Amino acid sequence: MTFEDKEEEEEEAGEDHHGPSHHPPAPPDELFDIATSVDPSYIISLIRKLLPNVKNDHNFCGADGDSAPNEGSKIDLMGESASSSPKDRVRGSPDHNSEAMDVVNGFEKSSYQDGDDENLCRKVEQPGVSAGEEVWEEYGCVLWDLAASRNHAELMVENLVLEVLLANLMIPQTVRVAEIILGIIGNLACHEVLMQRIVSTQGLNEIIVDQLFLDDTQCLIEACRLLTLCLQGSECIIWAEKLQSEHILQRVLWIAENTLNPQLIEKNVGLLLAILESRPEVARALHPPLMKLGLPSVLIDLLAFEMNKLLHERIPERYPALEVILRSIEALSVLDSYSQEITLNKKLLQLVCDLIKFPDKVEVANSCVTAVVVLANILSDIDDLASEISQDLPFIQGLLEMIPFASDDLEARSALWSIVARILVKVQEDEMRQSSLHQYVSVLVSSSDMIEDDLLDHQLDETSHRIPCGFKRSARVTAVSSLTC
């Protein structure tokens, strides 16, 4: 063999070793200083396999000479995610089929009129899934899981995963690919240390917000989850600026009004809750346009819809949506500038009272507790309402049944006793018929054990520094005095 032939053979071997030319070069050695439980080169190989030109290659499997890890190098994804992933992390199954967003038919459907359906719900191209795309989805799901770990997430970001995902979002994708991309970025956003890197990736913020205009349920779930995390992070002001367009906020409300999917309702209203509970700078940017677009009425209509489901169907999968709707209404009821939009609404008062009267409170205990707080906020603004509900004995029975559920929540317990105090001081014994008075006493006596247990369990609270104001103590004193009479 001549020297030239030997040199040419070495060059070919070198090319095989380094892989195809479209792969980025290997990172500097110092990037491997990040401690992970997975071989960093494996994570890097997964990121390379998400490159758009790799995904569209029908000979994608093994194209770069990398093979799947052997049994000894496989990772325990369940154990990893259980220890480090956020509790609201959503992970689609690998065989997930794309589904268009379910919408409400008939009179409940939104009257959103700002543009035709094509402009409103930007479709994602869904060509036939090739073998390369299936493999892309498989590797993408692995990275989705790995991103739940901070160490893995940092290694992924250092090796340009955000840039690779952005490149994929900028070309036509199947909805499954879009969902996986949003899921990976959503898990990266769970780590505050990486939030600045997400924001600083040029063009990524805008294209993430643009995913709200997709017409696929799972993609919208991931988009809402990701934006919720962004608004709760240190870079929330930047994200508020991206969302403050009336067109975008109207789309967020439109999704809430029109979807039937309970998980999408939960994530969508969770995004609205993050806005309502946000920092003052974010509130100044987003609260006024949302109120202008009718946020209170949207939340109340959603509550009516979920209450109807609760009273007639009792679907456990819908309970988280009910809870986050009530939490959003509670957040809105304490905003000085907008609280009257909630407290003056008769429909809301009836819905809250119906939930408190719901017999099987164990199923929706957290929602019932939040309903008590909302009602206390309403009564603090409109005291005359206490006279109306003081004659509703099933409501009073249901309210007293809430005592054990509110016992460990200082705010809810104080709210409950304030309601009891406001109601009982409105009871005019001298003006009541004897039979009505006996019914009232019977209701109170039937709950006497729960009342006594609560007072005994919290007898030290009166001297605790955790009680911030005298009103909470006087509410209990007033209530107990009225009960004694």
Image (cartoon, rainbow, N blue to C red):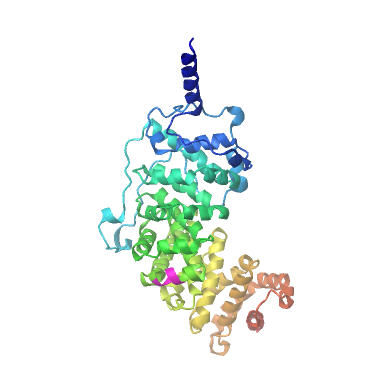
Q: Is residue 304 magenta?
A: no
In the rendered image, the residue lying farthest to the front is 3
Give the residues drawn in magenta, as a range: 284-288
Q: Where is residue 302 in the image (x, y as percent from the top left)?
A: 41, 63
Q: Does the magenta stretch include residue 286?
A: yes
Can residue 186 be seen here? The reply is: yes
Viewer-side residue, 348 vs 219 = 219
Q: Is the magenta stretch mostly helix, strand or loop?
A: helix
Left/right of residue 299 with respect to residue 485 in the rendered view = left
Q: Where is residue 140 in the image (x, y as percent from the top left)?
A: 47, 39
In the rendered image, the residue lying farthest to the top is 1
Left/right of residue 465 with respect to residue 416 in the rendered view = right
Q: Count of labels shown?
A: 0
Can residue 178 be seen here? The reply is: no
Q: Which residue sits at x=51%, y=43%?
A: 144
Picture quarter with the C terminus: bottom right
Q: Where is residue 279 in the image (x, y as percent from the top left)?
A: 52, 68
Dividing the picture into quadrants, the one containing residue 120 is bottom left
Q: Which residue sits at x=40%, y=27%?
A: 59
Viewer-side residue, 261 vs 10 = 10
Q: Which residue sits at x=68%, y=71%?
A: 454
